[in-house]
Structure formats: C-alpha cells, structure tokens
Amino acid sequence: MIEAARDLFPGGVNSPVRAYRAVGQDPPALARGRGGHVWDAEGREYVDWVGAFGPLVAGHAHPEVVAAVERALAAGGPFGVTTEAEVRLARLVRERMPSIERLRFCTSGTEAAMSAVRLARAATGRRLLVKFEGAYHGHADALMTGPDLMAVPYNDLEAVAALPLDEAAAVIVEPVAGNVGVVPPAPDFLPGLRRLCDRHGCLLVFDEVITGFRVAPGGAQERYGVRPDLTVLGKIVGGGLPVGAYGGRAELMDLVAPAGPVYQAGTLAGHPAVMAAGEATLRLLDEAAYRRLEQLGSALEEGLRAVGRVERVGSMLTVFLEDEAAFAAFHRRLRERGVLIPPSQWECWFVSLAHTEEDVQRTLEAAAG
Ligand SMILES: Cc1ncc(COP(=O)(O)O)c(C=O)c1O
C-alpha cells in the first residue's frame, strides 16, 4: 500500500507530517479505530495519542458522532442552501465563545486562517501581518510571506511592542503554541497582546484550530480570559470531518460577502454531515468531560516526566527529549510496544475522552527504558 501511495502522492502522502520523516520510519497502515485505540491492516492494536492531530477529542468512532453523521448523510445534501444543522452548530459555538457574534464555516483550518487574514486587511486597510516564529496557521503561511509579514518569538511581548504596529492589520497567534510542541502562554503575554492591539488599532486574531473547545469549553480565550477580535477554528468543531470556521464581532464579519466586499465562498461549506459531527462532539464536551481530560492529561504528564521535560495544557501535551535522534528512538520504542505518538517532537499528543487509565499505564510502561 505504501509503495502504491508513493507512486500516487508526492512523498506518498496527502499531508507532509504523515510521511514520518522526522522519525525515519514508514508510517503504519492504519485500517480501523475505536475509542482511544487504532488497528493496522494486520490487526495489530495501538493506543493512539495522535488523535488525527487534534479533532478526535471524543475518540475514534464515538457512537453518538457516528449516529449523527449517518443520520445527516441519509437525509441527503449538501443542499446548496443554509440548513438547520449550520444554525445549531453556530449557536453552540457562539454560546461557548461570546467574542464570536457572527461566523463563517469553511472546509479547513487553513482556509479559515487565510480568510481571517484577508478580512483583517480589509477591515483595517493595512497590509502588515504579525505572527510568531514556529507558529502554524495552515499552509496559509505560504501566502503570509514577504515584506507584509513580520515574525517574532512567541511569548516575547517586547519584541511585538518594537514592531510598527500602527501599520499592522493583525497580530495572529496560537494562544497556546501547539506547533513547536506545547508552549503555554506566559502570564501577561495574551493580555499584553490585547493591550498592544488596542493601542495601535490592529486586530488580535486567535488561531484556536487546536485549542478551540479543547483547553476549555470556550477555548483558550476562556481559559486565559482574553477576548480576540477574530477567532480561527477547525478540528474539534467538525468532530473529525473536514472543517474550518472564522468569526468575531458582527461589524467585522459583515465585511464578508454577501454582507460585505470580502469575497469568500465554498461549495461544501457547512456540509450537513460535518455540522452534525461537530454538534455531536460539542454536546459531549460538558464540564465533566473537561475534568476528565485534565485528569488523564495530568496522569500522563506526571508519568512522562521520567522520560523528558513535559509541557501540557489540559489535554494537549509534549514530551521534549534532548534531540531528534532521541525522539526517533523513543517513538520507535513506543510503537513496537503498541503505543502511537505523533511522528514529530513538534506535534502535540492529544488525550481524548475515550482514553482510559489503562491506556495511560500501558503508555508509561512502554515509555520506561
Ligand atoms: C494552529 C493551527 N492553525 C491552522 C491549522 C490548519 O488547519 P487545517 O489542517 O485544517 O488546514 C492547523 C493544523 O494543524 C493548526 O494547528
């Protein structure tokens, strides 16, 4: 299968990290998943901490998510018009994230980030975009290069303050850095960005593609008490199906077509099956669910400290080892013992509601020397 894929897709994959280059292995041929576990084509079982890189907070094939998607698919569509399913999911998003008065669903986090940046530029009439080194906003990054982009170190407020913010359309930030491994925000970092943006009339854009509905019911903006102007969403809000969304204050969002001049459209935007998966997933995420994620995350963190430095915010965590070679060896050892972790030190492990104490135990035993 891998040979066929190498012939068909560049590097054998449809998204680069799947090639497992950072750990120097062939990726497993996964065929099935249930709860916190996955199985390869030969029927070998693994505890799965990759979680599809974030969306599967309910685990694989959660019965309520599967049932909701089946019902939606059986009902036909997409219909090329607005549906009840979009309205229901949008209301849930808005209840949890009051900074989002109005939003637009699209089909990937990349598209959402790209659209939010275009909107920020249209709203301010400025071009400059400020981002943080190592941040990932999807391959929208490829469009965010050149003289219109300045990148400074994450958690470095002074470096942001030294930029020509009067010319900036937006500061875009992952409120918890998740694409350089987990890096929590320093205590005054996010409030400081809010103050700087207010002072200089630029927009604060939170890319909550990973953190949205994961680190708190209302995402990082709730957890850290900072209200962004625009929020970028993806992953969990689609319950494991292809999704993106961006939203914010009504007057900003009303610059988006057809309410306003910033044209952005999508044939499959708001697909009923995606909306159903997102709604079913968000409905599982009550207060008890976040307590459970915290509890499992904390048990995993404590045990993994024997292996390396661990950074964690709720159910996203990273184990930092001394170098790439040490990480590759660690990854291989876990894999041989039936535990799959992300194929790069710079990706987060994701705990789901379907994981168990036994999964944590099995992982810690596999991780021990
Ligand atoms: C913070 C962040 N923003 C945007 C994206 C892009 O989302 P997508 O892969 O759905 O295009 C990702 C993907 O991992 C991400 O981590």
Image: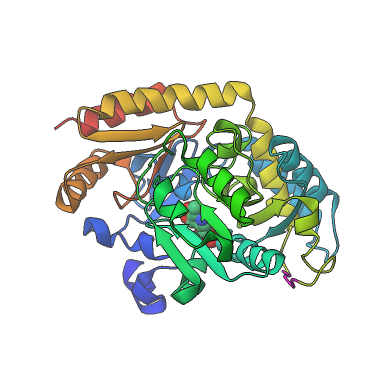
- Residue drawn at (78%, 62%) of the image: 78
With respect to residue 77, does 313 lie above or below? above
Q: Quadrant of residue 281?
A: top right
Position of residue 11 measured from the top left corner of the image (x, y, whole percent): 34, 73
Q: Taking the image as drawn, is residue 62 in sight?
A: no
User: Is 283 placed left or right of 350 in the picture?
Assistant: right
Q: Residue furthest bottom?
A: 7
- Is 11 or 218 nearer to us in this picture? 218
Magenta segment main secondary structure: loop
Q: Quadrant of the C terminus?
A: top left
> At x 80% / y 69%, what residue is drawn?
257
Can you tell which quarter of the image residue 320 is in? top left
Q: State the quadrant of the N terminus.
A: bottom left
Q: Identify which residue, 294 or 232, lies in the foreground.
A: 232
> Residue 102 in the image: x percent, y percent?
78, 51
Q: Residue at x 38, y 41 (%)?
A: 183
Above or below, comparing residue 106 to residue 288 in the picture = below
| Whole-percent x, y for residue 75 in the image | 81, 53
Give the number of callouts: 0
Asked whether the viewer can see residue 20, the reply is yes
Q: Residue at x 46, y 44 (%)?
A: 51
Residue range corresponding to the magenta coloring: 262-266
State whether residue 317 is above or below residue 204: above
Return the residue nearer the eye: 337 or 161.
Answer: 161
- Figure check: 227 above or below 359: below
Q: Is residue 281 left or right of residue 17?
A: right
The percent position of residue 171, horizontal first and vertical second, equals 54, 56
Tell which of 114 and 201 is nearer to you: 201
Q: How is the model colour-coded? A: rainbow
Q: In the image, is residue 183 part of the stretch drawn in magenta?
A: no
